[in-house]
Image (tube, rainbow, N blue to C red):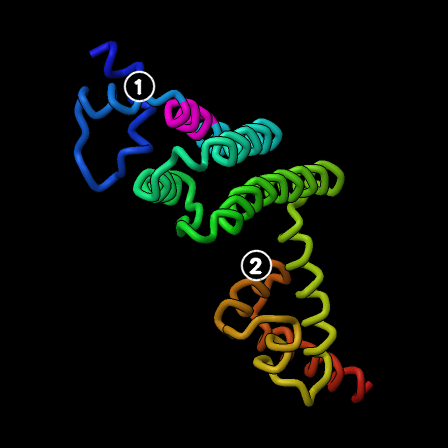
Amino acid sequence: MTTLHKIAYLRCSLGISRSWNKVDLFEVESQPAIAELCRTLIKAIDEYHKRHYVSYMNTIEQFIKIFDLQRDRISITTSLAIARFLNCSINAPMLTPTKEEDWFKSLRNLGEQLLDKKIKQALSSLFHKRTGTTFMQYITKLRMLKAKELLADPSVQVQQAAEQVGYFSSRHFTKLFKEIVGCYPSEYKKNLQMKKEAEGTT
Protein backbone atom coordinates (compact mmCIF):
# COMPACT_ATOMS: atom_id res chain seq x y z
CA MET A 1 0.00 0.00 0.00
CA THR A 2 2.86 2.38 0.80
CA THR A 3 4.46 1.70 -2.61
CA LEU A 4 1.17 2.36 -4.36
CA HIS A 5 0.74 5.57 -2.43
CA LYS A 6 4.22 6.74 -3.45
CA ILE A 7 3.57 6.24 -7.13
CA ALA A 8 -0.09 7.28 -7.15
CA TYR A 9 0.90 10.60 -8.74
CA LEU A 10 1.44 8.69 -12.00
CA ARG A 11 -2.31 8.17 -12.31
CA CYS A 12 -2.67 11.46 -14.20
CA SER A 13 -1.12 9.86 -17.30
CA LEU A 14 -3.47 6.85 -17.28
CA GLY A 15 -6.81 8.57 -17.69
CA ILE A 16 -9.61 9.36 -15.26
CA SER A 17 -12.24 7.18 -16.90
CA ARG A 18 -10.47 3.88 -16.29
CA SER A 19 -9.27 1.89 -13.32
CA TRP A 20 -5.54 1.43 -12.81
CA ASN A 21 -3.50 -1.01 -10.75
CA LYS A 22 0.06 -1.55 -9.57
CA VAL A 23 1.17 -2.99 -12.91
CA ASP A 24 -0.15 0.08 -14.78
CA LEU A 25 1.64 2.44 -12.42
CA PHE A 26 4.94 0.52 -12.52
CA GLU A 27 4.82 0.60 -16.31
CA VAL A 28 4.55 4.40 -16.26
CA GLU A 29 7.25 4.63 -13.59
CA SER A 30 9.62 2.80 -15.93
CA GLN A 31 9.30 5.74 -18.36
CA PRO A 32 11.32 8.56 -16.70
CA ALA A 33 10.01 11.25 -19.05
CA ILE A 34 6.36 10.52 -18.27
CA ALA A 35 7.08 10.04 -14.55
CA GLU A 36 8.79 13.45 -14.37
CA LEU A 37 5.91 15.04 -16.29
CA CYS A 38 3.37 13.54 -13.85
CA ARG A 39 5.36 14.59 -10.79
CA THR A 40 5.57 18.19 -12.04
CA LEU A 41 1.91 18.24 -12.99
CA ILE A 42 0.73 17.07 -9.56
CA LYS A 43 2.92 19.72 -7.93
CA ALA A 44 1.41 22.42 -10.19
CA ILE A 45 -2.13 21.34 -9.31
CA ASP A 46 -1.26 21.38 -5.61
CA GLU A 47 0.20 24.90 -5.86
CA TYR A 48 -2.89 26.04 -7.78
CA HIS A 49 -5.25 24.81 -5.07
CA LYS A 50 -3.11 26.49 -2.42
CA ARG A 51 -3.38 29.70 -4.49
CA HIS A 52 0.40 30.06 -4.64
CA TYR A 53 0.71 32.15 -7.79
CA VAL A 54 4.53 32.24 -8.14
CA SER A 55 5.00 28.54 -7.35
CA TYR A 56 2.18 27.54 -9.71
CA MET A 57 3.60 29.61 -12.59
CA ASN A 58 7.13 28.30 -12.04
CA THR A 59 5.91 24.70 -11.91
CA ILE A 60 3.75 25.14 -15.02
CA GLU A 61 6.78 26.50 -16.89
CA GLN A 62 8.75 23.41 -15.79
CA PHE A 63 5.87 21.20 -16.96
CA ILE A 64 5.76 22.92 -20.38
CA LYS A 65 9.55 22.64 -20.73
CA ILE A 66 9.50 18.91 -19.92
CA PHE A 67 6.57 18.36 -22.27
CA ASP A 68 8.38 20.16 -25.11
CA LEU A 69 11.62 18.22 -24.55
CA GLN A 70 9.84 14.86 -24.37
CA ARG A 71 7.15 15.58 -26.97
CA ASP A 72 8.24 12.69 -29.23
CA ARG A 73 8.02 10.20 -26.35
CA ILE A 74 4.53 11.26 -25.26
CA SER A 75 1.73 9.46 -27.04
CA ILE A 76 -1.51 11.18 -28.01
CA THR A 77 -3.31 8.87 -25.57
CA THR A 78 -1.08 10.03 -22.71
CA SER A 79 -1.46 13.68 -23.74
CA LEU A 80 -5.24 13.39 -23.71
CA ALA A 81 -5.20 11.53 -20.38
CA ILE A 82 -3.10 14.33 -18.82
CA ALA A 83 -5.39 16.95 -20.34
CA ARG A 84 -8.52 15.30 -18.94
CA PHE A 85 -6.86 15.03 -15.54
CA LEU A 86 -6.04 18.75 -15.61
CA ASN A 87 -9.53 19.58 -16.80
CA CYS A 88 -11.02 17.82 -13.77
CA SER A 89 -8.40 19.07 -11.31
CA ILE A 90 -8.18 22.77 -12.11
CA ASN A 91 -10.70 23.28 -14.95
CA ALA A 92 -7.96 23.67 -17.55
CA PRO A 93 -9.35 23.43 -21.11
CA MET A 94 -8.92 20.11 -22.85
CA LEU A 95 -5.79 19.48 -24.88
CA THR A 96 -6.20 18.56 -28.52
CA PRO A 97 -3.18 16.86 -30.12
CA THR A 98 -2.71 19.65 -32.69
CA LYS A 99 -3.13 22.66 -30.39
CA GLU A 100 -0.79 22.12 -27.46
CA GLU A 101 0.42 25.74 -27.52
CA ASP A 102 -3.13 26.96 -26.91
CA TRP A 103 -3.37 24.53 -24.03
CA PHE A 104 -0.13 25.81 -22.48
CA LYS A 105 -1.42 29.37 -22.86
CA SER A 106 -4.60 28.44 -20.98
CA LEU A 107 -2.53 26.94 -18.13
CA ARG A 108 -0.61 30.22 -17.84
CA ASN A 109 -3.89 32.15 -17.95
CA LEU A 110 -5.18 30.14 -14.98
CA GLY A 111 -2.16 31.38 -13.05
CA GLU A 112 -2.86 34.99 -14.03
CA GLN A 113 -6.43 34.54 -12.76
CA LEU A 114 -4.98 33.45 -9.40
CA LEU A 115 -2.99 36.70 -9.27
CA ASP A 116 -6.06 38.77 -10.19
CA LYS A 117 -8.01 37.20 -7.33
CA LYS A 118 -5.17 37.89 -4.89
CA ILE A 119 -4.99 41.54 -5.96
CA LYS A 120 -8.76 41.99 -5.63
CA GLN A 121 -8.75 40.39 -2.18
CA ALA A 122 -5.82 42.57 -1.07
CA LEU A 123 -7.53 45.79 -2.36
CA SER A 124 -10.81 44.79 -0.73
CA SER A 125 -9.03 44.14 2.55
CA LEU A 126 -7.17 47.48 2.36
CA PHE A 127 -10.39 49.35 1.52
CA HIS A 128 -12.16 47.77 4.52
CA LYS A 129 -9.25 48.63 6.80
CA ARG A 130 -9.26 52.29 5.74
CA THR A 131 -13.01 52.91 5.55
CA GLY A 132 -14.46 50.42 8.03
CA THR A 133 -16.82 49.11 5.37
CA THR A 134 -16.58 46.74 2.42
CA PHE A 135 -16.25 48.06 -1.10
CA MET A 136 -19.70 46.71 -2.02
CA GLN A 137 -21.32 48.33 1.03
CA TYR A 138 -19.67 51.63 0.09
CA ILE A 139 -20.95 51.41 -3.51
CA THR A 140 -24.45 50.50 -2.30
CA LYS A 141 -24.52 53.57 -0.03
CA LEU A 142 -23.46 55.78 -2.93
CA ARG A 143 -26.22 54.31 -5.08
CA MET A 144 -28.81 54.98 -2.39
CA LEU A 145 -27.65 58.60 -2.03
CA LYS A 146 -28.13 59.03 -5.78
CA ALA A 147 -31.53 57.28 -5.52
CA LYS A 148 -32.63 59.78 -2.83
CA GLU A 149 -31.66 62.62 -5.14
CA LEU A 150 -33.65 61.08 -8.01
CA LEU A 151 -36.70 60.38 -5.83
CA ALA A 152 -36.79 64.05 -4.85
CA ASP A 153 -37.96 64.73 -8.41
CA PRO A 154 -41.77 64.25 -8.46
CA SER A 155 -41.66 63.07 -12.09
CA VAL A 156 -39.31 60.14 -11.30
CA GLN A 157 -40.99 56.88 -10.30
CA VAL A 158 -39.42 54.35 -7.89
CA GLN A 159 -38.75 51.84 -10.70
CA GLN A 160 -37.04 54.54 -12.78
CA ALA A 161 -34.84 55.60 -9.86
CA ALA A 162 -33.93 51.94 -9.21
CA GLU A 163 -32.89 51.40 -12.84
CA GLN A 164 -30.90 54.63 -13.01
CA VAL A 165 -28.75 53.55 -10.05
CA GLY A 166 -28.23 50.07 -11.49
CA TYR A 167 -31.02 47.91 -9.99
CA PHE A 168 -33.43 46.22 -12.37
CA SER A 169 -35.26 44.40 -9.60
CA SER A 170 -37.40 46.96 -7.76
CA ARG A 171 -37.88 44.47 -4.92
CA HIS A 172 -34.13 44.21 -4.34
CA PHE A 173 -33.74 47.98 -4.64
CA THR A 174 -36.57 48.59 -2.15
CA LYS A 175 -35.05 46.15 0.35
CA LEU A 176 -31.62 47.81 0.18
CA PHE A 177 -33.09 51.30 0.30
CA LYS A 178 -35.01 50.48 3.49
CA GLU A 179 -31.90 48.93 5.10
CA ILE A 180 -29.79 52.03 4.42
CA VAL A 181 -32.26 54.93 4.48
CA GLY A 182 -34.68 53.53 7.06
CA CYS A 183 -37.88 53.66 5.02
CA TYR A 184 -39.25 52.37 1.72
CA PRO A 185 -38.57 54.46 -1.42
CA SER A 186 -42.29 55.13 -1.86
CA GLU A 187 -42.48 56.36 1.78
CA TYR A 188 -39.42 58.54 1.26
CA LYS A 189 -40.97 60.04 -1.86
CA LYS A 190 -44.31 60.60 -0.08
CA ASN A 191 -42.65 62.24 2.95
CA LEU A 192 -40.70 64.59 0.68
CA GLN A 193 -43.90 65.56 -1.13
CA MET A 194 -45.71 66.22 2.16
CA LYS A 195 -42.79 68.33 3.40
CA LYS A 196 -42.83 70.41 0.20
CA GLU A 197 -46.58 70.91 0.46
CA ALA A 198 -46.26 71.93 4.12
CA GLU A 199 -43.53 74.39 3.27
CA GLY A 200 -45.69 75.79 0.46
CA THR A 201 -48.60 76.56 2.81
CA THR A 202 -46.48 78.43 5.34
Q: In this view, does 202 lie above or below 43?
A: below
Q: Left or right: 187 with respect to 171?
A: right
Q: Which residue in the structure is indicated by mark 2?
A: 179
Percent across and percent down for residue 95 are: 41, 48
- Among all residues in the image, which is located at the extreme front? 72
Whether residue 52 appears in this view of the structure is yes
Q: In this view, does 53 lie above or below 168?
A: above
Q: Left or right: 1 with respect to 52?
A: left
Q: Left or right: 121 with respect to 12?
A: right
* CA distance separating discs 1 and 2: 66 Å
How many residues crowd around disc 1 within 10 Å: few (fewer than 14), some, or many (20 or more)?
Answer: few
Q: Quadrant of the rendered structure where residue 62 is?
A: top right
Q: Which mark is residue 30?
A: 1
Percent across and percent down for residue 177 are: 59, 65
Percent across and percent down for residue 81 are: 32, 40
Viewer-nearest of discs 1 and 2: 1
**Between 42 and 192, which is closer to the camera in this rendering?**
42
The residue at 64%/46% (across/down) is 134
Hey, what amino acid is under mark 2? Glu
Residue range of the region highlighted in magenta in the rendering: 33-43
